[in-house]
Image (cartoon, grey):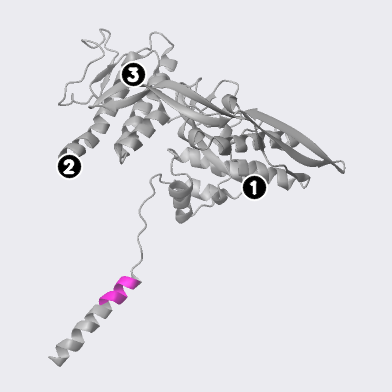
């Protein structure tokens, strides 16, 4: 008995020692990094994990992280201090959501400080508070159906904000005044007039950052030029004149093979496939070939971009952990605006979302 009593603790101690000596296994990153990218930017696997999972968890592509790395390398900035932000924006030219890189307000402050002539800033002054109702139609899910509901939000915000930035010019302290108006700069939800959550919850804080950025641009034009901050660009649309940041479009992917129709009945965009046989069926939807309307190359490129968008929408909604997260993804990608004027494309996006959110409805039913 004495021998058995001594043997068991030794066995546990040995197991404990083996466990303590075990090498921890790091799970693969959600955005795997290519060896050539790691070599180019001298990034270790653990550092890449920090960038992808902690600093930029909303980034959808490796290219977006690479743009942020390249921006910081050119500007000699420490990316782990998050001086830049990855902002998804709608490109009116590409007719798609693209990821862009914009400096945060901290990067503008750093650039101004590096000149050695930055002489401080006054406290931001706010105009009178205004209370206003904003209305707009947004998509909501009710009884497993996509419906448009008119939403009205009451927001109290300062009419304007002003600030004075100082700079030493030829030995003289000079003042540079800036003033911005809340209604001209706030970020909205989609194409509605409704302010997004950040601008509703922090009307002063967001306006504070924007007016400071405007003041720094006035005081240091040769350093900042027309460089807008991420806080100013959120919710904006890139037009053909926008050149401040590079745009990375989704990688074109070949059309996916036809899938069997789902068990549930899905409304088809037409009774039969196009007579010319140019249509492609995915997710139970027939997507019409528009190559006859444009050149063959343009038509193929557009179709490839559309299929890439469908894949992205499907995959991101499938990863959503809650209905609220799914709604946030839907609002961010804004598929109905992406396929404005394209009934087939809009219907397919709605069907993709309907299937994705069904798991949340089924979960509620099981709990009940």
Q: Quadrant of the N terminus?
A: bottom left
Label 3, label 1: how far apart the Cα atoms are: 43 Å
Magenta span: 15-20
Image disc number at residue 76: 1
Label 1, label 2: how far apart the Cα atoms are: 53 Å
* Rendered location of residue 151, percent (x, y): 39, 23
Q: Quadrant of the C terminus?
A: top left
- Residue 246 in sight here: no
Q: N-terminal of the two: label 1 or label 2?
A: 1
Q: Are the residues tagged 3 and 1 within 8 Å (C-beta)?
A: no
Disc 3 designates what residue? 345
- Of circles 2 and 3, which is in front? 2
Kindly state the secondary structure of the residue where label 1 is placed. Answer: loop
Q: Residue at x 36, y 63 (%)?
A: 24
Q: Are the residues tagged 1 and 2 within 8 Å (C-beta)?
A: no
- Count of numbered labels shown in the rendering: 3
Kindly state the secondary structure of the residue where label 2 is placed. Answer: helix
Disc 2 designates what residue? 367
* Mark 1 crowdedness (10 Å alpha carbons): few <14, some 14-19, many ≥20: few
Kindly state the secondary structure of the residue where label 3 is placed. Answer: helix
């Amino acid at each position: 008995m004495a021998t058995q009593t001594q043997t068991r603790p030794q066995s546990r101690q040995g197991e404990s020692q083996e466990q303590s000596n075990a090498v921890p296994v790091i799970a693969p990153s959600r955005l795997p990094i290519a060896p050539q990218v790691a070599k180019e930017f001298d990034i270790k696997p653990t550092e890449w994990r920090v960038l992808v999972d902690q600093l930029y968890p909303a980034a959808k592509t490796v290219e977006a992280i690479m743009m942020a790395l390249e921006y910081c390398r050119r500007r000699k900035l420490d990316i782990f201090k998050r001086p830049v932000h990855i902002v998804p924006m709608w490109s009116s030219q590409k007719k798609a959501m693209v990821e862009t890189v914009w400096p945060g307000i901290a990067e503008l402050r750093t650039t101004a400080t590096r000149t050695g002539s930055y002489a401080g800033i006054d406290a931001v002054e706010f105009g009178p508070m205004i209370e206003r109702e904003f209305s707009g139609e947004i998509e909501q899910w009710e009884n497993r159906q996509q419906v448009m509901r008119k939403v009205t939000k009451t927001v109290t915000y300062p009419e304007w904000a002003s600030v004075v930035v100082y700079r030493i010019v030829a030995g003289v302290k000079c003042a540079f005044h800036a003033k911005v108006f809340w209604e001209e700069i706030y970020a909205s939800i989609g194409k509605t007039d409704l302010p997004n959550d950040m601008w509703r919850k922090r009307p002063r804080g967001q306006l504070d950052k924007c007016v400071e950025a405007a003041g720094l641009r006035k005081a240091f034009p040769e350093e900042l030029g027309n460089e807008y901050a991420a806080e100013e660009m959120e919710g904006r649309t890139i037009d053909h004149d926008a050149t401040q940041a590079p745009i990375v479009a989704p990688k074109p992917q070949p059309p996916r093979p036809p899938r069997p129709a789902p068990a549930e009945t899905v409304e088809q965009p037409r009774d039969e496939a196009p007579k010319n046989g140019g249509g492609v069926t995915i997710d139970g939807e027939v997507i019409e070939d528009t190559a006859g309307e444009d050149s063959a190359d343009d038509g193929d490129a557009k179709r490839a971009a559309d299929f890439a968008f469908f894949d992205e929408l499907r995959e991101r909604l499938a990863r959503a952990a809650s209905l609220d997260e799914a709604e946030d993804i839907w609002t961010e990608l804004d598929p109905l605006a992406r396929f404005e004027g394209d009934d087939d494309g809009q219907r397919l996006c709605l069907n993709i979302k309907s299937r994705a959110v069904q798991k949340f409805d089924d979960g509620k039913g099981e709990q009940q």
